Every structure is written in C-alpha cells, then in structure tokens.
Amino acid sequence: MQELNWIYKYEDVGSDENQYTYEECHRIGPVDAKYVRSANEDFVGNPFIEALPRPREEGCLVNAYMVPIPEVDVQKLATMTINEQKETVLSLKRLRLPLAFQRQLEFIDYDVIVSSYMLRKSYIWEDKEFLGRKTRGSMIRMKGKIEDSAPSGFALLGFSGCGKSSSLKQLFENIPQVIMHHPSVGETLPQITYLVVSCMPNSNFATLYRQIGEAIDSALGNPEPEYELMISRKCRSLADKQLKVCQLIEMFSIGTIVLDEIQLINFNSNKENSYEGLLGIVNKTKVALSVVGTDEAYQKLFAKLRNARRTGDLIDASAYTSDREYFNYLVKLLLIWQWVDTPIEWSKELADTLYECTGGIINQLIWLYKWIMIEYLDSKSKGKAETIDKKFIHRINGKHFKQLKNSIDFVNQSKLEEEADREIMANAALDKNEYEMPKVNIGNLAYESKVTKQVLNMIRPLHPEYSSDDITRAVKEILSEEGSRQRRVDEIARGTLDVLMGNPRPKKKKAVPKSKPLSKNICDYISLDNT
C-alpha cells in the first residue's frame, strides 16, 4: 500500500468562473476532472479539492438561486379560454425566489466538502502475493486516519415550505456529482462529490443504508440497482450494511452525504439504529454528514452535545420569515407575474395580509398567490371580476388552506417567542443580516422574464429534449455575461443552445456594439444537430 499522488495541470479560468460547463454540472454519470489552483496553500496539490468548483461569488448568487418563469403575455392571454388562462398560472409552481440563508449555505457547503477531503488520502494496492495466491490489478481507496477528528457537516433546519430542499437542489446544480480523475494512462479514480438522500416516513436505518446505495447508483447512472442490492440483499445485519456503506464511501471518494427530511427517520434507543450509528460511519471514513429538516428534528439530533458538534454549522432556514422588509421585497418580486386586467400595485395592506396568511413562508406565499390568480379568473368568467383586496385574500386562504391555519398561527406565535428568547438562542442562531442575500433589481428580473419567454418559444419547438427549466437556467447563465443587454434575442438564443449542448463559452464577454442582422435565420442555427 502506498499513497497515490499524481501531477495534473490547471485550467485557466477567472476567479468568479466555474471550470465546468452547464452540461457537465447537470450530467448523469462521470465528468473528467478539471483542476483550478486554490488560493489556499493548504489545498494546493489536493486533486479532490482543486477539482471542485469554488463557491459562487456574491454577485452571482441571486442569479444562481433565482428561477423566474416567462412573462405573462396579456395580449395572448386575451385569446385563451379561462381554463387555458388558468393552466398558464400553474407555471408559478416552478418559480424560485432568492432567500436570505442561501448565501450562508453556499459557502458552508464548500467548507464542509473541502474539510472532508483534507482529512483523507488515496492509497493504492498494487499486485502482490498473499497466502501463496497472487492478486491481479490494483485497488485504490480513499482513507482517513481513525485517530483524526471527524469532519463536521451542516444542519439546515426550518419550517416546512421555507425553501430548504429547493435551495439544496440549486446549490448542487453548480457541481458535477461524479468527477473522474485519471492519475495515469488507463487509470481512473471516481469522486462522488455529494449524495442527497431523501428520508422516508418512519424509515429505519436499514432503509437509510439501502437509500445510500440507491443514491450511488443514481449518481453513476447505473441502469440496474447494483449498489442498492449489494447493501439491501447481500448484507444481512445492520452492522454489515453499515460496513458496506463505509467501503463504498472509500471506493467512490464520497465528499458529503446530505440527509433530507431527517425528521422522518425513526430514531430508536438502539445504538446501531440511532444518529450515533451514522456518526460511526463519519468517524471511520471522514465523510461529511449534513442534515436537512424541520425544527422538530432539532431535538432528535441535538439532544446530545456530541451530535450537535458533529453536525456542525446550524443554518436557520426560517430566519427570513421574521424579516418583514424582506417579505415585502419578495411580494414585490411576485407581483411581476399577474393574470389580472388591472395591475395589482404593492401596498402595505396587501403585504400585511399575505404575511398574516402565510407566516412569511415562501412556498405558502407562492401557492396562495397561485390560487388568488385562479379564483380571480374564475370570477372573471362569471361576468364580474372580483377586486383582489384583504377580504378576497382571506376568503381564498380559508377556502384552500383552512387546514394550515393552525400551523401558520403556530409559526407566527413561535416567532414572537423567538424574539423574546433571542439572547438565549444567540449561540444556536446566526444573525440573519450577516448572511442576507443581495436583493434583485426588479427591472432586471422583468427583462429576464421577457427574454426567457422569447428564447423558450424559439428553442422548445425545435429541441423538445430540453425542458423549460433547463432552458430557463441556461438563459440565466447567458444573461449573467457582461454585455448581455446589448445582444439581440437571437444571439441570446444561440448562446443558450451552446450552454445546453455544453459548448465552450468565451471567458469574458465585452459589451457588443449594435451589429447588422444576420443573414442566416436563427431557426436554422437552433435546429442544428448537436454533432
């Protein structure tokens, strides 16, 4: 056994750029490693760290976590039936707005993965003779020293619907899930940067270990459940399953495992079937373990100090719901998309009413707004469009979300209690202002929404293999380039298709002067095959 080291070359990319393309970050299966020299000398020479994309800069965060939907076309809307108009309202379910905790999550996740790889090294076992039998080939495993301290993860906790799982998905869209290293010619070394496991209701740890195997199969793009079956069928006892998970973590150089909806796991007093059992995996492999869940997970996880220490940074995903100024800002963003004849203007009464009904929770806000638009269109179809005022909003909320009233009241009451106990909880909660997400320019968002719609109409009919979400994210990437405002829509569509196909983009884009119309129609370009 000897430590595996190799020399690799660095990519020449800007400090605010990702060395991987959009397509590589979204690919199912391995992506060849691209290395960027780290600014931290402790990380230089560590291929598993220098192959990771760096956390996004503050100026890019809003664009990364904002997923707008196409602008509402009022003229086209007038030609539709009421049911067709209501169908377009359903696009609101895809809308994602920036949340304050995402800035904190972006950097802490990078810190967690890097800390995990700092504690481990890759070792290679060459051909050798053992008990009179000669083994063939080599075996590479990533291992940490048992005597070293285990890495900490993060705990992203907050009210149901506050945007935890959606933010987690957007976080990992910037990182290839499987990076393939090539230490020498013909030699490959896989690195699974992260696994996200969604816990099932009342599931035990045997189920959780099986899900980890399933997540590995999914990351690798395996058509058949190879590693899931290896854990669930070939390992009889819980201890055997745990050992097999450890072996897979070492074999695939897994950086972090994130357990989503952690409160759904059935924690028993049995030591093997408890959170402490998971920490045994962390101790052995040095993989970083992070958790995402509601506040009720807090007592399950942090009843013991050693659990709290290993879980690392506590990110309060609900903190923004207590910030009325931030909520007002979210409402102003939401009002960009309207399906009404007379535009709704922001007012304090409107914002206060929506806050009272939703508790400031983003998912609840968008869903209530969706039903406000649908009910308005229904009233319009009956010959008298209703006025969207305080009374109307309360009626719609009572009609569609009556079962959630007690939960919202509980949320609002808990906020009052939190403010009273803020000094006591100071060590557990971070100041939300320190990690506040930069606010979006509403005019820019309206422009982005309009351009996104036009590009969707150009690309979707000719390339149905790309989803609306994929095209929307690719448009955002093009619009983030310098000088994008000076480009025509057909040029933005070309760049969008380049991003979707994984074609290289210019590293820096200067402002483009107004140019002559192209002789070749944009549709001819867009319909080209990838090859």
Image (tube, helix red, strand yellow):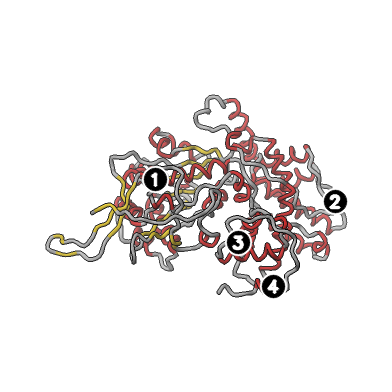
For marks 2 and 1 on the same chain, the one whose residue lies earlier in the sequence: 1
Q: Which residue is mark 3?
A: 470
Q: Residue 363 location in percent, x, y?
A: 64, 47
Mark 2, secondary structure of its residue: loop
Asked if labels 3 and 4 touch by Cβ distance under 8 angstroms, the answer is no
Quadrant where the C terminus is found in the figure: bottom right
Q: Do we see residue 214 in this rendering? A: no
Q: Residue 425 location in percent, x, y?
A: 52, 28
Mark 3, secondary structure of its residue: helix
Q: Do we see residue 462 in this rendering? A: yes
Q: Give how far apart the Cα atoms at labels 2 and 1 are.
A: 55 Å
For marks 4 and 2 on the same chain, the one whose residue lies earlier in the sequence: 2
Crowd around label 1: few <14 · some 14–19 · many ≥20 (10 Å): many
For marks 3 and 1 on the same chain, the one whose residue lies earlier in the sequence: 1
Q: Residue 515 location in percent, x, y?
A: 74, 64
480 vs 196, left or right, is right
Q: Which residue is mark 4?
A: 523
Q: Amino acid at mark 3?
A: Asp
Q: Amino acid at mark 1?
A: Ser
Asked if labels 2 and 4 touch by Cβ distance under 8 angstroms, the answer is no
Q: Which residue is mark 2?
A: 342
Crowd around label 3: few <14 · some 14–19 · many ≥20 (10 Å): some
Q: Which residue is mark 1?
A: 116
Residue sitting nearer the eye, 472 or 231:
472
278 vs 492, left or right, is left
Q: Give how far apart the Cα atoms at labels 3 and 1 are.
A: 31 Å
Asked if labels 1 and 2 touch by Cβ distance under 8 angstroms, the answer is no
